[in-house]
Image: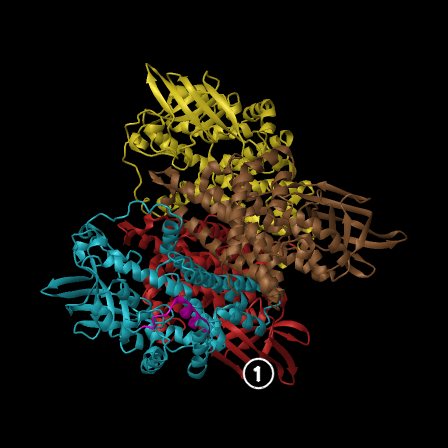
Chain colours: A cyan, B yellow, C brown, D red
Amino acid sequence: MTDDFRERARSWLAANAPRRSSSEDDAESAGSAERVRTGIAEQQEFQARLYDAGFVGITWPKEYGGQGLTNAEQIAFSAEAREYELPVGAFVIGIGMPGPTILECGNEQQKKRYLPKMLRGEEIWCQLFSEPGAGSDVASLQASAVRDGDTWVLNGQKVWTSGAQYSDFGAVLARTDPAQPKHKGISMFIVDMHAPGVTVRPLRVATGHAPFNEVFFDNVRLAPDALIGEENRGWDAAVVMLRNERIAIGTMTQPRSSPLAYDSLRKLADRLGRAGDQGVRRELASLYAREQSVHLLGQLIREDAMAGRFPGPRGSVIKLAGAELGRYATQVAADVLGPQVAAADSDDVRAVQISIVAVPGGAIAGGTNEIQRNIIGERMLGLAKDPGVDRNTPFNQLRVGTQRSAKESS
Amino acid sequence: MTDDFRERARSWLAANAPRRSSSEDDAESAGSAERVRTGIAEQQEFQARLYDAGFVGITWPKEYGGQGLTNAEQIAFSAEAREYELPVGAFVIGIGMPGPTILECGNEQQKKRYLPKMLRGEEIWCQLFSEPGAGSDVASLQASAVRDGDTWVLNGQKVWTSGAQYSDFGAVLARTDPAQPKHKGISMFIVDMHAPGVTVRPLRVATGHAPFNEVFFDNVRLAPDALIGEENRGWDAAVVMLRNERIAIGTMTQPRSSPLAYDSLRKLADRLGRAGDQGVRRELASLYAREQSVHLLGQLIREDAMAGRFPGPRGSVIKLAGAELGRYATQVAADVLGPQVAAADSDDVRAVQISIVAVPGGAIAGGTNEIQRNIIGERMLGLAKDPGVDRNTPFNQLRVGTQRSAKESS
Amino acid sequence: MTLILTQDEESLRDSVRRFVADRSPLTKLRDLIGSGQPYDADVWKQLSAQLGLAGLIVDEEHGGAAAGLSALSVALYELGAGLVASPLLASTLAAAALGSLGDQAASGALLPGLASGELIGTVAWQPAVTVAATASTAAGGCTLAGQLSPVLNGAQAHFLLVPANGPDGLGLYQVAGDAHGLTSEPLTAVDHARSLATVRLDGTPAVRLTGDAAAALAHVADVANLALAAEQCGAMAACIAMTSEYAKIRVAFGQPIGAFQAVKHKLADMQTGWELAYAALRAAARSGDETPGQFSAAASVARVMVSEPYFEAAADTIQLHGGIGFTWEHDAHLYYKNALSGKVLFGGPQDQLDRLAATLGM
Amino acid sequence: MTLILTQDEESLRDSVRRFVADRSPLTKLRDLIGSGQPYDADVWKQLSAQLGLAGLIVDEEHGGAAAGLSALSVALYELGAGLVASPLLASTLAAAALGSLGDQAASGALLPGLASGELIGTVAWQPAVTVAATASTAAGGCTLAGQLSPVLNGAQAHFLLVPANGPDGLGLYQVAGDAHGLTSEPLTAVDHARSLATVRLDGTPAVRLTGDAAAALAHVADVANLALAAEQCGAMAACIAMTSEYAKIRVAFGQPIGAFQAVKHKLADMQTGWELAYAALRAAARSGDETPGQFSAAASVARVMVSEPYFEAAADTIQLHGGIGFTWEHDAHLYYKNALSGKVLFGGPQDQLDRLAATLGM
């Protein structure tokens, strides 16, 4: 049956999907929010066709718009899709993070209302967790939702929100009881991104591009059914979502055509006549070995998942390994290109430059390397938690971010 | 005046001191306590002559047996001595650590009684801090000294004591008030290593040699004037001594002839025809650069000290840098030697093997790399102390080592 | 190509693991150090005959199990984790060479003995070192001359396969361990679990084997990479387990030391390195059985991904244990020495990268 | 050879440091990015004329201060710490080349202008790249052809010193910035503080300078190593200071993040790297003035000890700041890009190791 499914996926993709593009385009699109925005309508059109053909929400229950199939079919589809560049970037976050969280923690009405449209690309979702004062320590967030009758009023600022500029809904974490310890006074809500009081501002990063946003909530009124899960239990839902995020980032197949991938740097080395240097050859071989291993570890985790062994914190391993691979690739690129790294006189070199400047972001976004190492140490190896963490102090007595105390700053 | 002094040192050394030996001998002596032990009488004879010539305790006050000169003379002597292998290893610890501590914290009677004989090599000293349950966390030590009239009774076990087997006296830390927080109930004593109840046992390490000892104290009675500094203020004296230790280790000139030094590995590479490999050449050049820099940093710290800028926590920098240099040299050695690292068929390769096995000890002895990084971060960069440290809990309520609590185990 | 273990492989893993725990714990290695023996003869008998590990990659026609390279790697992983001293690697490489050559007579004469463990064989060669023996043909037949070092189990092998340059170019020659003019001198190996020797040949009678010697040596290098990667991956896991356990029970500054990020994060890095190495190992193992054309690159990748990280992990195992980890009584130095030795045998990290670069067409 | 600074050097350091703080803070660099200018002309005027930095290594006969390489390194350290954009490095290398060549006419014509800052010069060369220009002699004189990239301040220089192969072998040629047949195209430099261009020469008139061109280029490479090492060492210190300060005020999990060993120990490693680099820098600077025979090795050592560690420290500066450190508004990326650029210009770490190995006789 999986074979039939795979065959069907293969022919549909061949007939409908574009193949992977060249490396220069990748580097541009990696940084540019503009490009993504202009393509939203086309992406929605493609997503609807992909959905109608039966290749979205493959493992999700039928009653919420899914296909009700197994991991085997999902893996078969992913394997077939690897050679294609599906124009579905706008939906990756919704289906990868808020979606599964609503599936696991939402109520019946929410699942019926939101999930089918999310899958078909009719409504686009984003995720609103990080704040200027709450990065690695997400649970120290200060955005607040104050109950008013059967609704809530949302205030605060979020950062690093991908896709906020074109999203219809967001899954937002806000503090609903500041007198509780920090993990215990948080709730998760669905927020209508078109509601009055929501302001989205592009956030420019080191590369000069603005792939993320800042989002400001100014007395935004939430709907009566906006609460996902129980009030003040939003941290549980957040943990589910953060785990899904790490696995999504970690097992995302790095396109072969990335400017810092072995294939690209090898081609550059050949073109620039640098492959004659024994050190460069060894570095390229080492890059190949590391890249292969990250790729193989992703495969192993997927196979384990199919065999019923849940990846759990191994998402952190592959996220960390991917970030370190990027850092190593930076070193190889500098040795391959030499002085050209300082100032490119060709497009392929320029693409490498932009990618090098983007690399440090990969070790932060989706959880810093340090947070991943904590997760690996504590949840895989069973080591003790960091000493002196502030799990039991009421939030309004804690210092947060760069402010002297949460109280003073609110 | 310094020039005269230097000239005098130069001619005395030329007439009296042996030049540096070859690398094989170094590797042997690095690991072997036996070799050191057999030479004690000769060392004492040499030390006495060196002292009588005016080259020991150069900066120490004259009333305690020193020469009453300045850092300038000390540095001039060290520079001249660099080419020689002075047979004075047995006195390095006493003069480097307990000596300055007694100078700074001891009373007049102690200084008069102990320091001159220490300098002339008539009495040899060791230092007794570490315990099986108290390594990095020295202040969690469990050895106890209980007051009995005007003396104390010492019980407990110490480890990693260099030279205990031939020492006449030791500077020992023991707990005198277990109801105080751990730093506040410790005292430092002078212990007669020949007293009844003192047992010294050689401690075998990874190389198979026994360069250290375990020392057991079983109801050892201390002399009435044994206390260095004030009772329960021994931690202050210990901090002085540990700082002196790091500077002593860090600025110790690594002999050029060490089997893992650039000179030695370069010679091996030439002999084995490995210098044709570009990677090996680069590694050797990198080793040269790192080794030079550690050496130059030592010089810079000494120059700063002469100019009145106290090295302080920079001792930790050079200790850490030296340990990491050793680890890097290990990698270079493996690449230079190839399969020969696995099984030597010559003496010079065997010396490299022994040195490689000894390297991990260098990142632990005298304070682990982790402890040095804490010191650098906190005392040089002003960062906050580790969270949750146990500075205020009474010692007898703390868990220590691998035991459930100090109470249960005592 | 499926990376996870088959049920058969899981059973093999479990039985070897039990065997190591029951019959060859680390105290066995300390007994060997004391006795001066290269390995425990009883353990070897049980390993080879009872568990059948010596015949894993020997075909059934010659008394082996023909279980393949993946099964071999599963067994070696467990033996590596326990630092079990044995001539298994040496004999396995000899079997790999014979299998690749396809010399009927030699295979018939030697493989059954290798498979049962009654014969110990070795390939007297290190890939990164120039072939150091020469062959000459005289009246009575062929003789070899030269010095080979270090040779795995060179002092115990019943026969050696020696690459030598002769009148017809490179050949692989079979030499008896007790042949005339052969002297073997045991070396002081840095790894107590690995017996190595210098072998000198002087007019030593030898038989040139038929088949492609260069291809056989290349195969030996690939199998050695896979085998060492498997052992090292297991040993690295043992280091991580040992250090994690200690980090839970050792208290400093009022906390289990695993609570300190200096310890926690180093262990997390060790674990991450192991996960990558294990994935690469599984791919190499499967490739050896299923996609031989890609085996060489895959085996190099596996070796590169584990040799250096295991050595670093073994050094960090000492470091994170502190002083106790540097004592002779503690097991950490046994792994450190094993890692040092395994890093350089059959081509160190730089050699592997050269080999991989060549395979990738650079 | 004394490594610590003299009193004169301390005064110079203090005045340059004050100048940078007062007249060229990092906001200046952001203004430049917005304006598209390669550097601020006023700042350059003050740097060169007022502070006299352009003439530090020019002899007094030609209007310089003859203060020596150690003084130069002290000034560049402070400019590097503040990422001050200027043509100082380019002009200094041109002065070093002229000083080494000893061409009286050229020195007389060019050095006074360089020393006062009225002339901007550059050496159109990257040590690890093959000389790419050729010289030919025609009726009217000598002309050059070729393409040189990247050239430091190639689009602003009043004159360029171009190495070219001609009928008499390698020579250093003087070319006017506005010469016929010279086109320069500004490149998108990764470092906003470093202006680079591709220079194309096509029948461009040039004057061959007298003196040993190879020796002059070798000296340029050494001075470039010292100069870049000085800038980078200063910039690395700035990264450490910026990150330490942030680690004291940013709170997470109820603690200033500097209390976490992941942050504290990384900063300690950065500081340790800086201490080693600074010691190597001081030795190279003194060696340039006092022991010229050892200058080349010492300058390579300084460059090796700082280029890579500074780049790592700059990356870690972003990392330890977390998300805010990756924003455009934060200064961390300015250092990261500067470190990336400085790592490869005038020979990257591998090139330096090759150069050092050659100097050491390998």
Return the x and y of residue A331 as percentages of the image width and height. Answer: 49, 63
Residue at image coords 42%, 19%: B218
Q: Residue furthest right?
A: C139
Q: Picture coordinates of residue D23 (x, y %)?
A: 33, 64
Q: Nearer the viewer, residue D219 or B173?
A: B173
Is B311 inside the magenta-drawn segment? no
Q: Chain of mark 1?
A: D
Q: What residue type is disc 1 on? A: Asp
**Which secondary structure type mostly characterizes the magenta part of the structure?**
helix
Query: Which residue, as the protein is rendered here, is positioned at the far bottom?
Result: D139
Locate residue A135 relative to residue C134 in the image: left or right: left
Residue occupying the point 43% across, 80% down: A13
- In the current view of this chain or complex, which residue is farthest to the top? B149
- For mark 1, what is the residue? D202
The answer to whether one can see residue A200 in this image is: no
Q: Which residue is at the far left? A: A149
- Which residue is drawn at the image coordinates 38% and 73% (left, top)? A31
Q: Quadrant of residue C128?
A: bottom right
Q: Secondary structure at mark 1?
A: strand
Q: Nearer the viewer, residue C54 or A210?
A: C54
Q: Which quadrant of the structure image shows residue A63? A: bottom left
Highlighted magenta segment, given as a residue range: A66-80
- Examine the rendering and report whether any part of residue A88 can be seen: yes
In which quarter of the view is residue A317 placed?
Answer: bottom left
Q: Nearer the viewer, residue A271 or B125?
A: A271
Which quarter of the rendered picture does the C terminus of chain C lie within? bottom right
- Residue B352 vertical placement versus D175 (above, below): above
